[in-house]
Amino acid sequence: MAYDDLRDWIKALDRAGELKRIRTEADPILEITEIADRVSKSRNKDRQGTIGGKALLFENLKGYPGAQLLINQFGSARRMRLALEVDALDEIAERIRGFMDVKSPQGLLDKVKMLPMLAEVGKFFPKTVATGPCKEVIKRDNFSLLDFPILKCWPKDGGRFITLPCVITRDPKTGKRNVGMYRMQIYDERTAGMHWQRQKVAAEHYRDRMRQSVEHDGGAGANARASVDIMARSSGGAMLAPGDRPSGRMDVAVAIGTEPAVTFSAIVPAPPDVEEFIVAGFLRQKPVELVKCETVDLEVPADAEIVLEGYVNLEELRTEGPFGDHTGFYSLEDQYPVFHVTCITHRKNPIYAATIVGKPPQEDAWMGKAVERIFLPLMKLTIPELVDINLPIEGVFHNLMLVSIRKSYPGQARKVMNAIWSLGQAMFTKCIVVVDEDVDVQDIAEVTLNVLNNIDPERDIQFTMGPVDSLDHASRLPDYGSKMGIDATRKWSTEGFGRPWPDEIVMDAKTRALVDGKWKALAKELGLE
């Protein structure tokens, strides 16, 4: 059964022994980050030393009497499985694979066979309800963002940041909703930065809204559109030609403290035409219930702890940052749109949900590994020779991808690299390493052994230019730089390799079986039990 809300999820964490209630006073300014950082890098003694620590519910927050703050809720592989209600993340991948394997019906019998699956798909779509827990308290006046225990995470951060928001926007062309997760720097009681990077969906909604505004206000056709298309740097903001200033605003809603499938769906690389609320419904096998906002034309999860309603002005940018980011370095100041709050609704005694990012491993590492496992089948749609991928936690998602392939023609490793660089957010991958299918990419030692033995650097390393992650501080320009691919597959004669390729050292099966039969006694003698 799907979790009803964040509180139901907290109860499940408690029952599973995955939650610690912290009654010692803790300050949202820096102190909670230090505590959570230590816990995220600790090991659960009752879980065979697995890293990640426990989820933490702070119940004594300095300056916020009676408030509660949840952090590190997704901070281990076990909790990610618990959040998505599976014994293994591959179960979700198999469900995705099952839907992808459906063939177009050829006759009446095929159509009848599809009816149960169509009925199941219907369970995924969100439904709008009249009201919900997030409407228990409605504040159109006399409200402040500072009423909530929002974190300042690291010493050089530009201020306090909302770090685990579900930011909801609507495509001005199609009307489809998007749910993204973009940090929000608090400027004052009613405004915050909206850090949607240039390549994010919400930033595209913002640009489309600007284009509509310029054209509606009499912009000079193609010239006006072109001026909007050169929008600014990493920020998703805009630099327009004189006379082409956009006017108006774009509605935005922010849900904080949603049940885990909704929160997780905000970070998944969903196909462009699939709303994240549908992804969440698929993950939880139950539709997400939505309610209409009070002051903007958007819908939000009915069970959210806190909802911020508001808008961004199309012509307003403000300095945002620095921010201690998941790369382990501070992302620097830049210009981003400003979110103006028009109304706050929340549950009675709302629980504030947050996360921190920084040097890995952190909570976001386990969320990223879940994305890796779940969406491998979707990658295989475009790259069918893929066997497995690994995004090492230390590679902070966009710096390193290890790939194993079923090689069947010369140059295939390079084809795979280019295919990955053409896939959505995978385009930011700085280094791609491709190995043969018999190399376990989840075993870093095995990958290292094979890569360093199998490559001739000048022959097997290629460089290309293209878009890079906005957080890449080493790139020559913001959002643009070089990427590297390494072909560590066995080289064939048809790839110009004329020498014999040596066999890997492997003991014969007969000898292995012989020693297997003696190993228990040997292990005792050797002290290896």
Image (tube, helix red, strand yellow):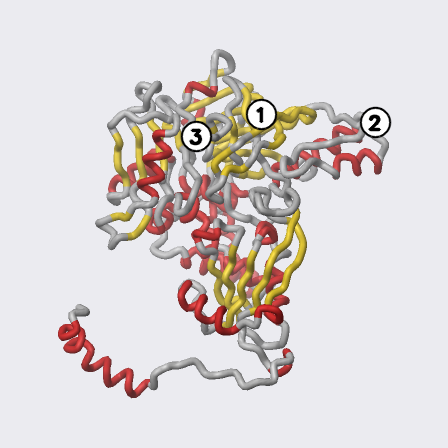
Between the C-alphas of marks 1 and 2, the distance is 26 Å
The x, y position of residue 131, in whole percent, is 46, 26
Which residue is situated farthest in the bottom direction here?
Answer: 510
Which residue appears at 14% of the width and 73% of the height? 524
- The residue at which mark 2 appears reads as 218
Answer above or below: position of 161 versus 200.
Answer: above
Mark 2: give few (<14), some (14-19) or many (20+) Cα within 10 Å.
few
Q: Earlier in the sequence, mark 2 or mark 3?
A: 3
- Determine if residue 108 is in view: no
* Nearer mark to the viewer, of 2 and 3: 3
Image coordinates of residue 344 in percent, x first then y, are 49, 21
Amino acid type at circle 1 is Phe
Residue at 82% x, 25% y is: 243
| Residue 155: mark in rendering | 3
The percent position of residue 149, horizontal first and vertical second, equals 39, 24
> Element under label 2?
loop
- Residue type, numbered disc 2: Gly
Which numbered disc flags the more N-terminal residue, 1 or 3? 3
Relative to 494, residue 294 above or below? above
Question: Which quadrant: the C terminus?
Answer: bottom left
Q: Which residue is mark 1?
A: 339
The reply to whether callout 1 and callout 3 are in contact (CB within 8 Å) is no
Q: Nearer the viewer, residue 366 or 111?
A: 366
How far from the left and from the top, in percent, is residue 89? 40, 55
